Image (cartoon, rainbow, N blue to C red):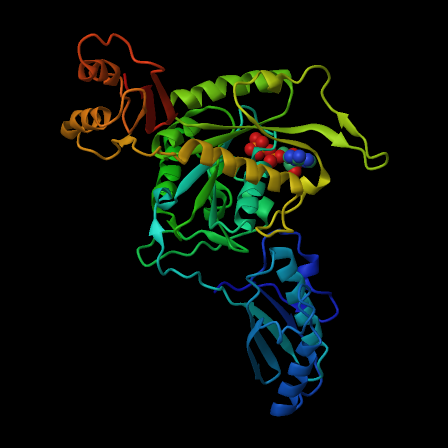
């Protein structure tokens, strides 16, 4: 366990309150070299415990003992060491509780040195598996331009999905500007499982992984192949806990990192974030095409910061004049999120932890995923998914011939069934030159549905 070398003389004020470092200090210490003669043994222990009982858990409003935050208290020759588990608090709050404990202890007659150590709650390594492919689905959040609110939307979306009961991970792939840890107020250390694979950091139940958690300064300097290798390793090695969904915060634009990510990670859908400004929207249009060319289903677009609600008059004001260029995009609008102070807070994976705009976005994303990925196989359809190529023709023929004339016929396939029309005409026999209402629709990158009517 790391220890903060800083030591406060009594009366200097708590170190945590003076700290300008955003990251949590792992422990706080106060020395009182000129303290009065210490009380003997048990008396001092009692006084120390009584002082700690005055410190309350700011979230639950019970004492730190009742909240289960105190793991151990050791008193020896005027030295007090408290082991506290503050892992559930955001870093600033953990520092504030630590500082309050140190202050309370330093007021105890006979205490010369008070020291609070943070116990690192080691994450559960049981059942974890390495690789982003262990997620049931991966939803990427992308933007054509920087600064449009992509990370804000990704973090809020992850929290909204988790608030609805999903097991969710958030992977920050924005390698040159990994802002997720700061936005969610989480920090390392990143622990490893028994094979040395990094375990995501916990944010109240949301599993968070980011290059920004691995090192505080290196990612900004990574370029080209180095950045690519670092990300690939994290995609392959991060040990997830069987998540339903991993939300992937991509770097802005369609540079190398974003494109190689799409080749390495099976993305089930992408959400584009843009402001409704012409230049941003036309770049978004090009990015959407590129993602489609890479077989990534586009879930839709989030229009962000296009309007604001006046706190004084309650009216909605547009920030961009004229027609909304987003209407011309060939993708559904998932959410229209105004400029709202609530979106600048720290989201949490709880019902009251995300703004209503984010909850609505979560619902829209869920619906789009279902539209694209939940394949509704009609009764008596011929389902060729997973069937050996040699057996496919026979299955189609048997299914087609079993139908009465005039009945609808469906085939569901995991390959493009380009030749099925000719084959059905052959099976239908001489004299049949066309198939009524014949249609092939690709529902998602791996599912095609053929519809027609048995002549
Ligand atoms: N709807 C909103 N209302 C108010 N502020 C917002 C909103 N969306 C984003 N912001 C603010 O805009 C700023 C940029 O947001 P964010 O960092 O999410 O953008 P980004 O597109 O991820 O940027 P980058 O290009 O650096 O990755 C942040 O300060 C964020 O709090």
Q: Residue at x 74, y 31 (%)?
A: 308
**Residue 158 locus on image (x, y percent):** 53, 44
Can the viewer see residue 332 in this picture? Answer: yes
Can the viewer see residue 32 in this picture? Answer: no
On screen, residue 43 above or below 328: below
Q: Foreground residue, 69 or 153?
A: 153
Question: Where in the image, quadrant-wise, is ligand 1 located?
Answer: top right
Looking at the figure, which quarter contains the C terminus? top left
On screen, residue 298 above or below 5: above
**Residue 361 locus on image (x, y percent):** 58, 37
What is the residue that sits farthest to the left in this orientation? Answer: 390
On screen, residue 100 above or below 296: below
What is the residue that sits farthest to the right in this orientation? Answer: 313
Q: Residue at x 60, y 80 (%)?
A: 79
Q: Is residue 374 left or right of residue 62?
A: left
Q: Foreground residue, 211 or 275?
A: 275
**Residue 56 locus on image (x, y percent):** 69, 71
Q: Residue at x 61, y 39 (%)?
A: 360
Q: Is residue 228 left or right of residue 71?
A: left
């Amino acid at each position: 366990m790391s220890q903060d070398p800083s030591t406060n003389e009594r009366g200097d004020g708590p170190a945590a309150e003076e700290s300008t470092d955003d990251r949590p200090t792992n422990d706080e210490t106060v020395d009182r070299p000129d303290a009065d003669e210490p009380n003997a043994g048990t008396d001092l222990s009692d006084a120390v415990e009584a002082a700690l009982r005055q410190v309350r858990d700011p979230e639950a409003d019970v004492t730190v003992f009742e909240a289960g935050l105190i793991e151990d208290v050791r008193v020896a020759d005027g030295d007090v060491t408290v082991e506290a588990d503050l892992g559930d608090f955001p870093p600033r709050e953990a520092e504030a509780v630590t500082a309050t404990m140190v202050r309370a202890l330093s007021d105890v007659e006979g205490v010369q040195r008070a020291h609070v150590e943070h116990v690192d709650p080691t994450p559960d390594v049981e059942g974890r598996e390495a690789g982003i492919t262990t997620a049931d689905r991966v939803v990427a959040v992308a933007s054509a331009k920087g600064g449009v609110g992509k990370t804000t939307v990704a973090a809020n979306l992850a929290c909204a999905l988790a608030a609805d009961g999903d097991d969710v991970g958030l992977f920050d792939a924005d390698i040159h500007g990994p802002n997720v840890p700061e936005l969610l107020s989480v920090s390392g250390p990143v622990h490893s499982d028994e094979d040395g694979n990094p375990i995501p950091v916990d944010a109240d139940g949301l599993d968070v992984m980011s290059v920004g958690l691995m090192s505080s300064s290196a990612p900004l300097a990574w370029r080209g192949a180095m950045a690519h290798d670092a990300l690939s390793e994290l995609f392959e090695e991060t040990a997830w806990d069987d998540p339903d969904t991993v939300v992937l915060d991509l770097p802005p634009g369609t540079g190398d990192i974003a494109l190689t990510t799409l080749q390495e990670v099976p993305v089930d859908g992408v959400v584009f974030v843009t402001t409704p400004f012409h230049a941003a929207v036309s770049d978004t249009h090009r990015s959407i095409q590129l993602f489609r060319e890479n077989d990534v289903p586009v879930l839709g677009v989030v229009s962000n910061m296009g309007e604001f609600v006046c706190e004084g008059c309650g009216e909605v004001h547009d920030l961009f004049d004229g027609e909304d260029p987003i209407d011309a995009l060939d993708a559904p609008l998932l959410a229209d999120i105004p400029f709202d102070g609530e979106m600048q807070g720290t989201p949490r994976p709880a019902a009251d932890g995300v703004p209503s705009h984010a909850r609505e976005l979560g619902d829209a994303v869920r619906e789009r995923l279902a539209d694209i990925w939940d394949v509704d196989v009609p009764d008596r359809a011929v389902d060729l998914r997973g069937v050996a190529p040699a057996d496919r023709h026979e299955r189609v023929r048997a299914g087609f011939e079993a139908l009465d004339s005039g009945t609808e016929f469906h085939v569901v396939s995991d390959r493009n069934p380009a030749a099925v029309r000719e084959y059905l005409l052959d099976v239908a026999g001489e004299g049949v030159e066309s198939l009524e209402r014949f249609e092939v629709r690709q529902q998602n990158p791996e599912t095609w549905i053929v519809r027609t009517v048995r002549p």
